[in-house]
Amino acid sequence: MLTASLLTLGSPEQLTGGYLYHRRLAELAPRHGARVNLVSLPALPFPLPAAFGHLVRRWAAAADVLVVDSIAAAYVAPWRPRPPLAAVLHQPPGGIDHGPVRGAAQAALDRALYRRCALLVLASDTLAAADLPPVPAVVVPPGRDVANPPERPPLDLRRGRRAALLSVGNWVARKGTLDLVEAFARLPSASATLHLVGRTDADRRYGRRVARRLARPDVAGRVVVHGPVSRDEVAHLYRSADVFVLPSYREPYGTVYGEAMAAGLPVVGWRAGNLPNLADHGEQGLILGPGDRPGLAAALERLADDAPFRQRLADAAAERARRLPTWDETAARFVELLAGMAGR
């Protein structure tokens, strides 16, 4: 059986899209003749994780292929682990959440690691347009299936209003959580209930700003904060909601958009990141110019109040999602690529 070490940063149990990608690959790889072991460098401030390169060499020696997650690439670069070496990219070189100095330093190290790889596995077509070294690269997108459809009845997420809006994303600036709350505040009280899923403490300062905004009377009683929830619970929420909204400014793939569409939800967000590659404006959802809070409010109000229009977009979203891969198909492709690298 092919064995791969997939190296990331911090706990693989985290709830963001990149960590989910790794866990699903590890869960499903044995069906396709491979074992993917998730290993991690400590989540310490930049550049301290690079001090643990002795672990990188150990993990490389214990596997047929070492696969490095893009969030760990900068820390692995100085250690030159033995080939065969691959990288799986969920972000462009330099990352997406850092300042210019850290971003430039990390980008140089990321590219140094990627130049020594035999293969770059990209999570989306958006990343194919990033400034990457001339190394073979293949897009292997995430699966659309978040979990098995729940057997229990749908939740009452509307809470007596005309529609339930669902957003899944940690409270960080690039996810546009404040933009969403400000836009939602413009809706009439009877239009919709907004449900927020994700970590509220990923950026503590930003999270406090969101919490203060939610405490104001114009949204009081109309927003439900769920915090982080399990994969099964997310699936249940998708199946119980009417509309998915995430006005993210930078989203290399946006796994949650594909999951929501597969659950039959129209998607709403900014014309940024990978969303325009997943849905068309007026077809599978409503896509607005980044930062257009009045436009976002108008889009949400229309979807809440116009059930036939909402259903038309929902049906188109579900149809479009059927062309996206399942996690099992993603795992099969990933294993196939690694087996080719290892000469299996």
Image (tube, rainbow, N blue to C red):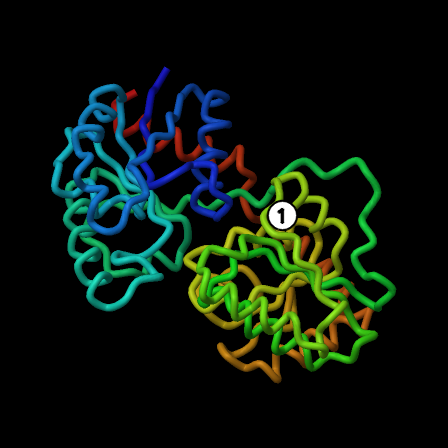
Q: Position of residue 151 (x, y in %)?
A: 79, 35
Asked if residue 285 can be seen in this view, the reply is: yes
Q: In this view of the protein, which residue sits in the foreground, 89 or 137?
A: 89
Q: Position of residue 81 (x, y in %)?
A: 16, 32
Instruction: Using the image, determine if residue 49 lies above or below residue 131.
Output: above
Q: Position of residue 39 (x, y in %)?
A: 34, 30
Most extreme residue toward the bottom is 294
Crowding at dot 1, Cα within 10 Å, few <14 / some 14-19 / many 20+, comes out as few
Residue at (83% x, 74% y) in the render: 190
Residue at (61% x, 68% y) in the render: 268
Residue at (22% x, 28% y) in the render: 55
Instruction: Using the image, determine if residue 134 lies above or below residue 79.
Output: below
Asked if residue 276 can be seen in this view, the reply is: no
Q: Image check: 16 left or right of 195?
A: left
Q: Quarter of the image for the C terminus: give it.
A: top left
Q: Which residue is mark 1?
A: 322
Residue at (58% x, 48% y) in the render: 228
Q: Quarter of the image for the N terminus: give it.
A: top left
Q: Image check: 209 left or right of 229?
A: left
Q: What amino acid type should be assigned to the residue bearing mark 1?
A: Arg
